[in-house]
Amino acid sequence: MNSALSSMKRMMDDLRRRKVFRAAAAYTVTAWLVIAIADVVVPVLRLPDWTMNLVILLAIAGLPIAVVLSWLFDFSPDGGVVRTTTQMPSAAASAGPGSFVIAALTGALVVVAGFWLWRPFSPVAASDIRSIAVLPFVDFSEQHDTGYLGDGLAEELLNALVGLDGLRVAARTSSFAFKGLNEDVRSIGQKLNVDTVLEGSVRRSGDRVRVTAQLINVSDGFHLWSQTYDRQLNDIFAIQDEIALAIVDALRVKLGAGEDRRVARASSTSFAAYDLYLLGRHHWHQRTPASLQRAVDLFEEAAGQDPEFALAYSGLADAYLLLRDYGDLDNSVAQARAEAAIARALQLDNELAEPYASLGLLRMSRDELTGAELAFRNAIELDSSYSMAHMWLGLVLDRTQGPLAAVTEYRAAYRSDPLHPVINGNLAGALARMGEYEQARRYLQQSEAANPDSASLRVHLSWLESYYGRLDEAVRWALGVNRSQQELAEKTQPLLATSFATMGDLNQAMTYLGAQDPATESARAFGARAQVLFAGGEYARLLTLASSRIEQKPADDEIAVTERIWSGIARMAQSDYAGAIVDFEAVLDFAAKKGLDAPVHIDTLGMLAFSYGKLGNTVERDSHLALSQEVLERERQRGWNSPAFRVAAAGTFALQGDSRRALAELAAAIDSGFRDYHWLSFDPRFENLRDESQFQQSIAGVRSELDRMLGRSTELIKATVAASLR
């Protein structure tokens, strides 16, 4: 044994003398760096895929050569190369330990390099790669005028991959939120919660196009696949088919029956139609009146180029329905045009999810909620990752089953599209109604951080803060909207007016009401004006205005719910309980047909119970009070628990004579953010509680908090004015 140890020691000394270890280490480090650099450079230079294999194989083959050369040769003091002198170790000793060390070093590099060699081509287990995000392809054209083509190519690839069994695809809005941002792909993948990211570029020159695509593993940032295509523009469909199928192959996604056909199915056989459709979607996603009208024109042109292009008709229907909400297209006209376009799209291809979702949206606009739900579920069955179908289904369920049912669909939409402003807005709204303020704010803020130019998210944040009594924060967000996007002022101006009215600055509130004719202004603007008049105690003026607006409605028109509610409140303030009953019963008729928010429904029943009681009609009083309790329990089970809902519950308990529960609910409502001091001071349901010290302390605390928020809001106004003068 001593002899063996002595031989090993002599061998190690000889290896060190011949600098074998130093040579092996230097070679290994150098080879590692060369392989790492090649892994990055090869795709950028668009070299063939086998280039990387060659680099790795040469690196492996070079190690034993380097070790042998270091054993045999050395550098002389004058810089020449000489044979290394031998010493006494026996041939056996040299062959034994030396061979072992050389073999070990060679094996180490083989293992390391083999990782690179095997990684891009080894099958990726489904448990490892289950999701992908498709980023918009960068426009590298000289004129930078084909960005929509890169967006469209990415969108079509995304559409081709969604719904494949075992593969989750991040939705368009979330993926496209990173357009133009110089952010690391791994960071993007982590934010979108995906395993892989597909990115690329498009360069168009005349009738030719060069498309470069690369699939990147988020966990390590290395390429799983990359390719460059130089083709005629008319071959764009073949390119997207090849990319989609290559991704499926790279991720080893197992295609089910018929899925290979769907992945490779072109949307249109006409490039001109396809080009117009992509440009139309580009404008449609901007969601402004002008961009939506432009989208209509482009979708119509696309359908003209290819009359059998189903998605062109689906896009046309979507544009009409959004113009109804974002523009000034008459509701009946929008519905009729959308219906014809949807029918044509379904006739051409009844396996697309989009037309069914558009059909659901059309039915929802007509309050055909059962039919809308059916259409949305059909769309989801065809494409379970279609986020818009989930979101729109959530809107239906919000009306029919409450926020608890709706939030399930909103979350499903969120999983596919976590950065979509509208999805986050609807999810936050449902959570807000459930009393989950912190969750709601977190969703909106993370979406706003990813979409800093989205004024709609600031509108949502302003509404949320107002809903939870953070009126100074509501003012801050609303002022930000007005600075960035004036066309949303019709939403934020009324909110600013009601916020300042609630805080007690009626003069400032009036500045946000605008110069519109009060008799013809929008329902939202009228609601703000009514709040200002109510806060100022101008009940006669409020009743006159509400009554004049009600009289202007055609006999067959739906009742003006907002006007009826304020008319009833103004009548109660003037002890006209019989007139108030007429108004509130009309509101109940509307609720039976189309539903109402739970707090409004419960408050209406409470006002009726109180008014009937004042007139001595105890039967109707008790009937409406019992119904109020029934609605309260039902809506609480459906998820309602907002500050306004808890005030409505407190009012119901107060009418029942249960002071303890009424004060407890009222305290909980104020703790969670209810700040409408004027309503608490007026609400007739609390007339038997006003002398209670707990009630007085509660509303005094509200008044103090409002004064604090008014001071901050006033400073925000001054800062905004100063900024506008710079």
Image: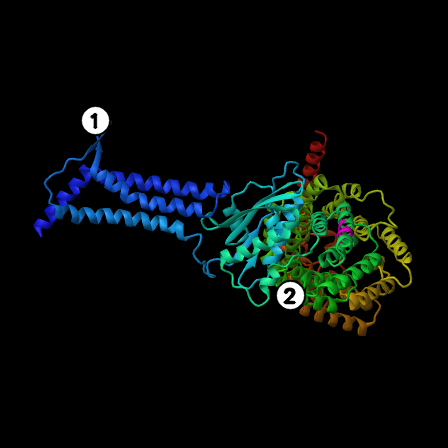
Instruction: State the extent of the magenta-drawn residues as a range.
Output: 298-302
Q: Which residue is under mark 1?
A: 77
Q: Residue furthest left?
A: 2
Location of residue 597 in the rendering, given as x and y in whole percent from the top left corner: 73, 62
Magenta-drawn stretch, dominant element (helix, strand or loop): helix
Left of 81 or right of it: where is 33?
A: right
Residue type at the position of mark 2: Leu
Residue type at the position of mark 1: Pro
* Up/down of 607 relative to 181, above or below: below
Location of residue 490 in the rendering, given as x and y in whole percent from the top left corner: 77, 47
Residue 301 among magenta residues: yes
Residue 121 among magenta residues: no
Residue 435 vs residue 216, the one in the foreground: 216
Q: Which marked residue is nearer to the observer: mark 1 or mark 2?
A: 1
* Up/down of 184 relative to 673, above or below: above
Q: Residue at x 80, y 44 (%)?
A: 513
Q: Earlier in the sequence, mark 1 or mark 2?
A: 1
How far apart marks 1 and 2 lie (CA) works out to: 77 Å
Asked if labels 2 and 1 touch by Cβ distance under 8 angstroms, the answer is no
Location of residue 482 in the rendering, given as x and y in whole percent from the top left corner: 72, 41
Residue 650 vs residue 296, the one in the foreground: 296
Q: Which residue is under mark 2?
A: 382
Neighbour tally class for label 1: few under 14, some 14-19, many 20 plus, Cα within 10 Å: few
